[in-house]
Image (cartoon, helix red, strand yellow):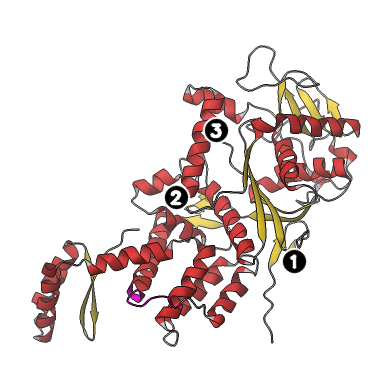
Amino acid sequence: MAIDYKLKLFNTLSKKKEDFVPIQTGKASMYLCGPTVYDRATIGNFRTYIFGDILNRVLKYNDYDVKYVQNITDVGHLTDDADQGEDKMEKGSRKAGKSAREVAEEFTQLYFEDSAKLNIERPTVSCKATEHIKEQIEMIEELEKKGFTYKTSDGIYFDTSKQPDYGALAHLDKAGLQEGARVGVNTEKRNITDFALWKFSPKDEQRHMEWESPWGMGFPGWHIECSAMSIKYLGQPFDLHAGGMDLLPVHHTNEVAQNEAIYGHKTVNYWLHGGFILVDGKKMGKSLGNAYTLDDIAKEEFNNLVFRYLTFTAHYRQELNFTWESLSQAGSALSKLYKIVGSFLNNKPDNTISDEWSSRFLEAVNDDLNIPKAIAVVWEMIRDKNTPETLKLSTLYKFDEILGLDIEKNAKNYAQLIAKIPESIKQIKEDRDIARQNKDWKKSDELRDELESKGYEVEDAQDGTKVLPKINL
C-alpha cells in the first residue's frame, strides 16, 4: 500500500483533517496571531508560537514559498472579552511607570529575543496594530456602510445578529449563551455576542494611545486589527490562519464575522488551533504565580531548546502539562541526542538523505504536524544498526530544518568536549579499568565517584569504561 505524503491539516472549521490545497500553486499564505506586548510572553504563549513555527517550517519543507505574517498587538486588547475594563497596554504602562509606547517597544524587543532563543524563525512580515490604524478605520467604515454596526456610549459595535452563521468557526450555541458567562454585562449591547470595533476615549482622562476617527477620538477594538493586517498583507482569501485554542471562541470567531460581513465569502481556507499548556495539571495564569517565562527556565539552568523539545512530546492540538520534572526529562533526552550524534562525527555526512527514514519522517510531519511521531522516527533511525552513521548525520541535519534543535551545532560542540578530555581524566579511566579487571569494586566505585565529581558521566561497557563530558540542558 502506497503511503500518502500529501500535507494534511486539521481544519477547525470542518473539524476534520483536510488535504492542504493552496490558493496559488507552490505558494502558501499564513497568518499567526502574535503577542500582546504589555508584558513578557509566557511559555504558554510560546507553545503557540513554536506550533506556528513548525507549521511554517513544514510548509517550507514541502517546497512551498511561504508568506508568513504575524501581528504585534500594541493597542486595543482589553482586559476581558466583554470589551470592558482597560486596554492591556494602558495597564502595562501604569504598572511599569512608562508610556504605553515605551512598554510596547520593550516587550516587542523581548518577544523577538525570546523567539530567537527558541529558534523560532522570524515571520516574513511582523506588523504592529498602531501602525495600521488607517486600515482598521477603513474596514470599520466599510462595515458601517453595509449596515453591520451601531453606536453606544462607549464605542462602535458589530451587530452579530446580522450574521446568521455567527459562531460557526467555534461551533458556538448562540441560543445557549448566557449574559455574563462568555462576556460581561453591557446593557447597551443589542446581543451578548456583539463586539467593539472602535472604543471612545474616556472623557475624563487622556490615553497614551488614541486617534481621531469618523466617530471621535478613540482606539480600535482588538479583533479588527487582525482582519485589517492579515488581508492587507495576504489578500483575501488566504490559505492559513493559526493561533492558540484560547482565541477560538471570541477573537477568531469575531475575525470571521467582520471579514465575511465585508467580503460576503470565506476569507480563510484553513483555521488551525494549538492546545493549552497546563502547569502541574492546573491552568496557567499570572494570578496563580505559574505563568513562567524563559527567564524562569534559565534560572533553573535549562537551555531554552529544552522547552522547544518538551513541546514536541505532545501533539500541537493536545494539552501539554508542564512540570519541572518533565522539563528535566526533556533535557536528558535532548542531551542524549546531542551526545549520540556527536559520537557520529568521527565520520562526515555523505550529503545524501536516507529515502526510507525521510519517507517515514515526512509521513509523520505531514500528518497534521505530528511532531511526537517524527521524534520517534528520529530515535528509531539513530538506534538502527543497519543505517550507516554518515547517512544518519546528513538525514538528521535535513530533519532539523523542521525540528530547529541546532543538532549539528550542538553535536559538534559535544564532539569538541570529547576531544578535549584531559590526560588526567584518561588516566583515572585507565586506573578504573584495571580495578574492574582485578574485581576491586571498592576502588572502581571510588574512581567512578572521582570522575563524576569532575563533571564526567561514566558508562560501563564490555570494552571498558566510557567517560563522557556532561551536558547540562
State the predominant SS element of the stretch in magenta: loop
Q: Measured from the top left, where is residue 357 in percent x and y?
A: 53, 79
What stretch of residues is rendered in magenta? 343-350
Query: Is label 1 or label 2 in front?
Result: 2
Q: Are marks 1 and 2 in contact (CB under 8 Å)?
A: no
Residue type at mark 2?
Lys
- 3D distance between C-alphas at marks 3 and 2: 20 Å
> Which residue: 65% across, 30% down?
130
Residue type at mark 3?
Tyr
Query: Is label 3 or label 2 in front?
Result: 2
First in sequence: mark 1 vs mark 3: 1
- 3D distance between C-alphas at marks 1 and 2: 33 Å
Q: Does residue 315 show up magenta in the picture? A: no
Of residues 263 and 38, the one nearer the viewer is 263
Q: Does residue 344 show up magenta in the picture? A: yes
Identity of the residue furthest to the top in this view: 204
First in sequence: mark 3 vs mark 2: 3
The answer to which quarter of the image holds residue 371 is: bottom right
- 3D distance between C-alphas at marks 1 and 3: 36 Å
For residue 38, which numbered disc appears in the image?
3
First in sequence: mark 1 vs mark 2: 1
Which residue position is annotated with label 2? 117
Q: Measured from the top left, where is residue 133 in percent x and y?
A: 71, 29
> Which residue: 56% across, 74% down?
361
Q: Is residue 129 visible?
A: yes
Which residue position is annotated with label 1? 18
Q: Tag 1: Cα neighbours inside 10 Å, few (<14), some, or many (≥20)?
A: some
For residue 440, which numbered disc appears in the image?
none
> Which residue: 52% across, 77% down?
353
Of residues 277 and 407, the one nearer the viewer is 407
Report whether 287 appears left or right of 272: left
